[in-house]
Amino acid sequence: MSAAQHMVNNMHRFVLCRAARAPFCGGPCGRQRGFRFYSTSGTLCQKSALKIPTTHLPEMPSCDFRPDEYKGMSKEQMMQIRRQNCNPMTMKITSFKRPVFIHQGHMQWLWDVDGKRYLDLFAGVATVSVGHCHPRVTEAAVKQLKTLWHTTNIYVYPPIHEYCEKLASYLPDPLKVIYLTNSGSEANDLAMLMARLYTGNFDIITFRNSYHGGSPQTMGLTSNTSYKYPIPSGLGCTNTMCPDVFRGIWGGNHCRDSPVQTTRECSCPQGCCMANEHYIGQLKETFATSVPSRIAAFFAEPIQGVGGAVQYPKNYLKEAYTLVRERGGVCIADEVQTGFGRTGSHFWGFQGHDVIPDIVTMAKGIGNGFPMGAVVTTPEIAASMAKAVHFNTFGGNPVACAVASSVLDTITTEGTQQNSLEVGTYLMTEMAKLRDMYEIVGDVRGKGLQIGVEMVKDKTSRDPLPADAVNEIFEDIKDMGVLIGKGGLYGQTFRIKPPMCITMEDADFFLAVFNKALHNYMERS
């Protein structure tokens, strides 16, 4: 077989029809896997998957749900209000040159005001965990809204106690005391306060390329200039080198806990990771040069979210936790994006690192899009908050607790975590074939449905693909009916973090769309 024919075969192998039925999580939108393709004129073509021309468009999987007809204000009126009355940051962060005007959602699908359907692979920034307007969760919200909208924890009401008991059962001992908040930034802000009160120390260490929130305090934890305002903020926060085995100084081809490894050369003997040793050495250097001998805390996401699904060497967090505790600090796991089964192999991302933190923060998927967050810690650390009065008007309100409780039930009864593992692993292994085909796809990484695809100028330099090129591919994917996200220090990484109800057929559709978008870009270039 010639090299050219081998590449053609590789290009189309991943869209082969598979006989096995996907895990059923998408309600009436699920169906048997397999592909039909349309020409650009819309004519149906019944062709072998090995011979599909790249001018043909993959057919979107069917969905029985029918959205309501949109009868609201015009797009022009929305954009005028967006410019004049919404804060200016709203326009700055608007995705796409041609924005998507979202009207309705159901499970893994979104519809715009014109009735066009999109496969949502970004889930409102990794927030919709079990599906848009999931019937079980919606029913729980409506039931609670008819009973009691709001009261605070100065009174004793069932939903908050039922939820706290249930959430605590998902965490290992001694993580059994829960503070409920309204967002991830608020949860991380509270965790910073707890750590400082409990230890009596002040300095906190985080990774470069991290994101832990945008409040005045958490802005110090966040290590990305795009989120930094030119004011004093986050005093006592120090960033250490991120142990990124793809873009970092050191890395190899068996460093991380992922179905897909980097393509970097590695000469480490079995059971040894020199990259990990070097990165731990950098953390020790930070201890020696940048912070006092006693610190308050070490913050880390099990897998970086906004940073682009960056993963660390397998034993890094375990060794880092030991070093932090030797210096009087507590270890904080930011599970805002990785929690609630998203990584597939475990319910919490930290479990994949074989560690138990002292404090865990969470938000996003906790409420499937309902504003909510939480801090879970030990009784000893929680007791430090009794030094003054801490009160949160909306934290743990009845509707939030009812929604979050239903989310936990849904994840358990519908096998959402297992689906995340199976579909996510399939997506990554198939995208790794695209990485091997296209010079601009530098890395595919992640666990479960926490996935990053890093785009580069070339695999040798690993320099980020320029923003205009990334945006071109990003826009093309959207125009073909799929919504994904972007992240990374330079905005060079595509983020794939869908509702965890997506099916194998949805995955195949995205793979075909992504391949076509890459092919289109290479042809234009």
Image: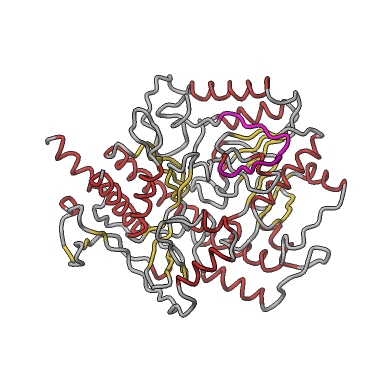
Predominant secondary structure in magenta? loop
| Residue 379 position within the rendered picture, expressed as x and y whole percent measured from the top left | 78, 45
- In this view, the residue in front, 378 or 219, is 219
- 401 is higher (above) or lower (below) than 274: below
- Asked whether residue 347 appears in the rendered view, the answer is no
- 486 is higher (above) or lower (below) than 62: above
Left or right of 61, for residue 412: right
- Asked whether residue 413 appears in the rendered view, the answer is yes
- The total number of labels drawn is 0
In this view, which residue lies farthest toward the right?
A: 387
| Residue 30 position within the rendered picture, expressed as x and y whole percent measured from the top left | 37, 66
Q: Residue at x 75, y 25 (%)?
A: 292
Q: Residue at x 27, y 51 (%)?
A: 516
Asked if the stretch drawn in magenta spans residue 266, the answer is no
- In this view, the residue in front, 176 or 286, is 286
| Residue 427 position within the rendered picture, expressed as x and y whole percent measured from the top left | 37, 48
| Residue 321 position within the rendered picture, expressed as x and y whole percent measured from the top left | 65, 31
Residue 480, located in which quarter of the rendered image?
bottom left
Left or right of 274, for residue 504: left
- In this view, the residue in front, 12 or 254, is 12
In this view, which residue lies farthest toward the left?
A: 1
Quadrant of the snapshot with the N terminus = top left
Residue 232, located in which quarter of the rendered image?
top right
Asked if the stretch drawn in magenta spans residue 240, the answer is yes
Q: Which residues are magenta?
A: 226-241
- In this view, the residue in front, 270 or 357, is 357
Q: Residue at x 64, y 24 (%)?
A: 286
Quadrant of the snapshot with the C terminus = top left
Identify the coloring: secondary structure
